[in-house]
Image: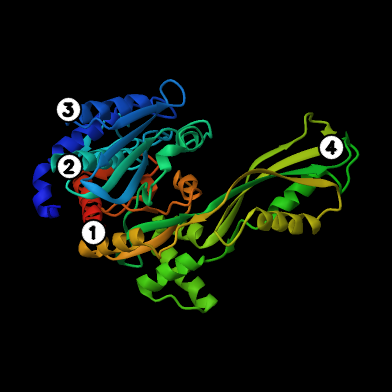
């Protein structure tokens, strides 16, 4: 393969920016992913790339698969992204579907998550094709639908169920995002090696309904309120992965009090980082839905509470259930049920394999420090990991990742980082030869 400095001459930044603007202008909020796929297919056809498939779970909900085969057998690498976006929310200063450029940034919903990345993936395929596919192995790009909503009938879970061949023979995968992060004044390129799990239980409290004039201590709303007050909102817990990350960054100590003070120091000195560190260093528990009562003058005989917990690989659904049971047992002897609603286990990819080591090598080659982290939310990577495929999120940038803009107002990306991310992927493929 050519060196990156030589290969760079075969790609123009502006052509990448133009594709990003085009697909930002398609408001793919839980729909219209096929329209984005067609924009990319037009480019593939112009470049003479014929190895692609558009697989729709229903009309308009398209998953685009692009294959670029090298000159011989080698490492088969899957790149996973998505073309849907979250709703807009409030506070935008520009049209969120304009793709407008300001001061070197391209703005719009999906500019970070995840349309910039699928543009980089697309131009990785274009670049390798322009260079005569002078590499060993196969590059497969999956631009999925419905990552944000996670409906099992669309996107990656649909493909696993209906088109499992897509994942056959894959040796490793790259997932969405990554980027430059700053913790305690130290800058590093994030490598997401795992994701927190999500567990939702429905707590059903049962009692005796009666007229509201007949007050008593067994009012379910009173009991439920006491339960919510006593249920921990967060439990300090640092996964082994995060301990290793902090050790690499600034010398993690085994003493628990020191670790808490370090986390507190980091959070106090960076309000944006505060939210992330809180989620990364705690099991979080939130009440998300509460239902009780049907009339203003009747004490209800039933109360339902949905509890959502975000956990690490060291916990599971049973761990959360025991926590709920322990809290309830302290405040009521009433009948209650704890019913599992959803469970997405935390997933983790080992760091002892060729792909991870080559990602680390690539980041260091680009004069950055690699920082392994666990992602506090979930993504399609969890489903790919369930197939036994190691997945790492890796997206090299020169500007720090703006966590508050992901799913927020005025989402944007520094346009030169499209090339920086492309450089990272190209170097990775070269290093893995």
Of tags 4 and 2, which is closer to the observer? 2
Do the residues bearing badges 4 and 1 touch, measured as CB atoms within 8 Å?
Answer: no
Which residue carries the number 1 mark?
A: 431
The residue at 25%/55% (across/down) is 428
The residue beneath circle 4 is: 301
Q: Is residue 70 left or right of residue 217?
A: left
Mark-to-mark CA distance, 3 and 1: 29 Å
Mark 3 — residue?
Answer: 46
Mark 2: secondary structure: helix
Query: How far apart are labels 3 and 2 at the CA level?
Result: 13 Å
Is residue 270 depicted above or below 298 in this figure?
below
Classify mark 1: helix, strand or loop. Answer: helix
Q: Does 285 sit above or below residue 296?
A: below
Question: Depth check: 82 or 229 in front?
Answer: 82
Among numbered discs 3 and 1, the one appearing first in the sequence: 3
What percent of the width, then of the height, locates residue 88? 41, 33
Pointer 3 local density, CA inside 10 Å: few below 14, some 14–19, many at least 20: few
User: Does any portion of residue 103 appear in the rendered image?
Assistant: no
Q: CA distance from mark 4 to mark 3?
A: 66 Å
Q: Decide: few, some or many residues near mark 4? Use Cα within 10 Å; few <14, some 14-19, many ≥20.
A: some
Estimate how packed mark 2 is, as few (under 14), some (14 to 19) or many (20 or more) residues with alpha carbons within 10 Å.
Answer: many
User: Does any portion of residue 37 appear in the rendered image?
Assistant: yes
Quarter of the image with the C terminus in it? bottom left
Q: Which residue is mark 2?
A: 127
Q: CA distance from mark 4 to mark 1?
A: 64 Å
Q: Secondary structure at mark 4?
A: loop
């Amino acid at each position: 393969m050519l060196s990156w400095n030589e290969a760079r001459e075969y790609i123009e930044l502006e052509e990448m920016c133009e594709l990003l603007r085009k697909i930002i202008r398609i408001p793919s909020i839980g729909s219209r992913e096929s329209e984005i796929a067609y924009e990319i297919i037009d480019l593939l056809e112009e470049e003479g790339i014929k190895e692609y498939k558009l697989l729709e779970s229903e009309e308009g909900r398209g998953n685009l698969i692009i294959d670029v085969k090298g000159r011989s057998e080698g490492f088969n690498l899957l790149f996973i992204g998505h073309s849907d976006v979250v709703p807009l929310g409030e506070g935008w200063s520009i049209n969120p579907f304009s793709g407008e450029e300001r001061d070197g940034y391209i703005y719009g919903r999906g500019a970070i998550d995840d349309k910039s990345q699928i543009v980089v993936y697309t131009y990785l395929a274009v670049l390798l094709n322009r260079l005569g596919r002078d590499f060993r192995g196969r590059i497969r790009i999956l631009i999925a639908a419905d990552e944000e909503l996670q409906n099992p009938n669309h996107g990656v879970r649909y493909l696993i169920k209906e088109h499992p061949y897509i994942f056959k023979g894959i040796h490793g995968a790259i997932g969405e995002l990554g980027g430059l992060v700053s913790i305690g004044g130290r800058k590093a390129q994030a490598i997401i090696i795992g994701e927190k799990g999500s567990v939702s239980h429905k707590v059903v409290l049962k009692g005796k309904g009666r007229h509201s004039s007949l007050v008593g201590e067994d009012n379910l709303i009173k009991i439920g309120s006491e339960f919510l007050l006593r249920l921990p909102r967060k439990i300090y817990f640092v996964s082994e992965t995060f301990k290793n990350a902090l050790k690499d960054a600034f010398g993690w100590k085994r003493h628990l009090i020191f670790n808490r003070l370090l986390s507190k120091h980091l959070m106090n000195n960076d309000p944006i980082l505060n939210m992330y560190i809180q989620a990364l260093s705690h099991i979080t528990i939130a009440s998300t839905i509460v239902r009780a009562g049907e009339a203003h003058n009747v004490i209800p005989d039933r109360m339902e509470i949905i509890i959502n917990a975000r956990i690490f690989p060291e916990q599971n659904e049973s761990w959360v259930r025991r926590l709920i049971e322990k809290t309830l047992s302290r405040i009521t002897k009433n009948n209650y049920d704890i019913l599992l609603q959803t469970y997405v286990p935390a997933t983790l990819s080992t760091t002892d394999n060729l792909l991870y080591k080559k990602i680390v090598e690539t980041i260091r080659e680009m004069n950055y420090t690699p920082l392994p982290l666990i992602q506090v939310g979930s993504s399609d990577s969890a489903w790919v990991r369930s197939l036994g495929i190691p997945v790492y999120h890796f997206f090299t940038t020169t500007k720090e990742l703006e966590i508050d803009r992901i799913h927020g107002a005025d989402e944007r990306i520094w346009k030169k980082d499209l090339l920086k991310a492309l450089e990272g992927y190209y170097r990775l493929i070269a290093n893995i030869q």
